[in-house]
Amino acid sequence: MVQFFVFHAIVESAWARPYRWARNNISDLGNAHCAMQREPEPRYICSPEHGLMNVSFIALGTLLVVGAALTGPLWRRGATANVARFLLAGAGPGFVLAGLAPADVHENQHVLGALLIMGTGNIGLLLAGAGLSNDVARPLRWATSLLGITAITAFGLFLSHHYLGLGMGGMERVAALPLLMWTLAVGARGLFHQATRRQDASGSLTQSATEKLPRPQEREYPSPAG
């Protein structure tokens, strides 16, 4: 997640004409050619560092699949959790496809990638609120479901060209970024708890070893003559 936002900032800063979050899609950063686009909103796209953005898309998708596979302790046992993880992982190939097929080169494949990200991924995000284990704080579980509802609603508004004053790019971000921000938050939580467990385990081992050390024997000394 971190590399995606870093590369996003680097690539957008390379535009000669200012890149606007409200006016431009995220995919515009990966377009391979400079051209005037008419759909869905007229805008001029020219992304000199598009290759870097597409590499970032591919890395993000790959790591998302790996993360979904390696976060077993975060999830309950049962169908809901399994389906949620499967759908969240499905957003990974969407990002990979978006990177391999820029919108101005292979539009159909790119659209399929976007559907996997904002359709499959956001449904998985909605289900994740009920699929996370009880070890995850209740506010985070509620926030997960709320983010899923928000993202799915925004995706529907984006497809119907209802931007509510946010612009095309702004509404797309409301549909796409909740999944990324949630992944970043859950990943940070996992790393923090792992570090805490290691410290606790190290402390327990040290305490156990100290308790096993032989205690020095007390020696009795004769009291001095009064």
Image: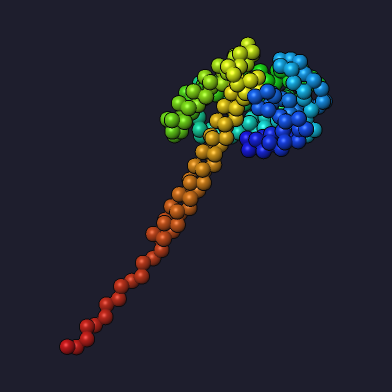
Relative depth, front residue between 148 and 93: 148
Locate residue 210: give its quadrant: bottom left
Establish if 195 lies above or below 26.
Answer: below
Q: Is residue 62 visible?
A: no
Count of numbered circles on the image: 0
- Locate the N terminus and report the quarter of the image it occupies: top right
Q: Looking at the image, is 78 positioned above or below residue 184?
A: above
On the rendered structure, is 14 left or right of 206? right
Report the residue that reaches farthest toward the bottom.
225
Colour treatment of the image:
rainbow
Task: Give the residue at x 54% y 35%.
Answer: 185
Residue 33 placement (x, y as % from top left): 82, 25
> How far from the left and from the top, in percent, is residue 8?
69, 34
Q: Quadrant of residue 5?
A: top right
Residue 159 rendering spot, x and y as whole percentages? 64, 13
Q: Is residue 130 left or right of residue 173?
A: left
Q: Pick whichever, 179 or 93, lies toward us.
A: 179
Q: Residue at x 65, y 24 (%)?
A: 22
Residue, x 39% and y 59% (percent of image)? 211
Residue at the location (63% across, 20% down)? 167
Task: Quadrant for the C terminus, please.
Answer: bottom left
Find residue 42 and report its image quarter. top right
- Across and down, in percent, residue 137 comes to 43, 33
Q: Nearer the viewer, residue 151 or 89?
A: 151
Is 5 placed above or below 42 here? Answer: below
